[in-house]
Amino acid sequence: MYVCVCRAVTENEVHDCIAAGATSARQVRDTTGAGSDCASCVRKICAMLKRSEDLIPTA
């Protein structure tokens, strides 16, 4: 499914970006282009980042 229609960025691409170390919407934007046009996808990207943080166990 597309996260960013403007740049045709999929959920898998965003997940891959997060897995590679992105921790902010800006880093996802810089890597994938998502959020650089109309920015309506930034909330979705932030939610995906939040979910990924929730999955990381804290020591």
Image (cartoon, rainbow, N blue to C red):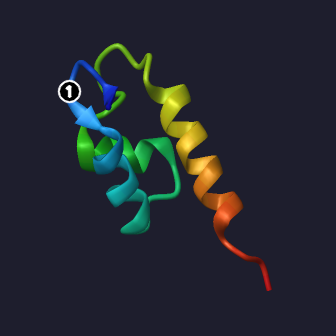
Q: Residue furthest front?
A: 1
Q: Quadrant of residue 34?
A: top left
| Image spot of residue 20 (x, y percent) | 36, 68
| Image spot of residue 28 (x, y percent) | 38, 47
Q: Quadrant of residue 6?
A: top left
Q: Quadrant of residue 35?
A: top left
Does residue 52 appear to the left or right of 26 in the view shown? right
Q: Residue furthest right?
A: 59
| Image spot of residue 57 (x, y percent) | 72, 76
How many marks are shown on the rendered structure? 1
Tell me the amino acid under the disc marked 1: Arg
Q: Residue at x 25, y 35 (%)?
A: 9
Q: Residue at x 28, y 38 (%)?
A: 10
| Image spot of residue 11 (x, y percent) | 36, 41
Helix, strand or loop under label 1 = loop
Does residue 9 appear to the left or right of 26 in the view shown? left
* Relative to 38, residue 15 above or below: below
Which quarter of the rendered picture does the N terminus lie within?
A: top left
* Relative to 42, residue 33 above or below: below
Q: Residue furthest left?
A: 8
* Mark 1 residue crowding within 10 angstroms, few (<14) / some (14–19) / many (20+): some
Q: Residue furthest bottom?
A: 59
Does residue 45 appear to the left or right of 57 in the view shown? left
Q: Residue at x 29, y 19 (%)?
A: 37
Which quarter of the rendered picture does the C terminus lie within?
A: bottom right
The residue singled out by tag 1 in the image is 7
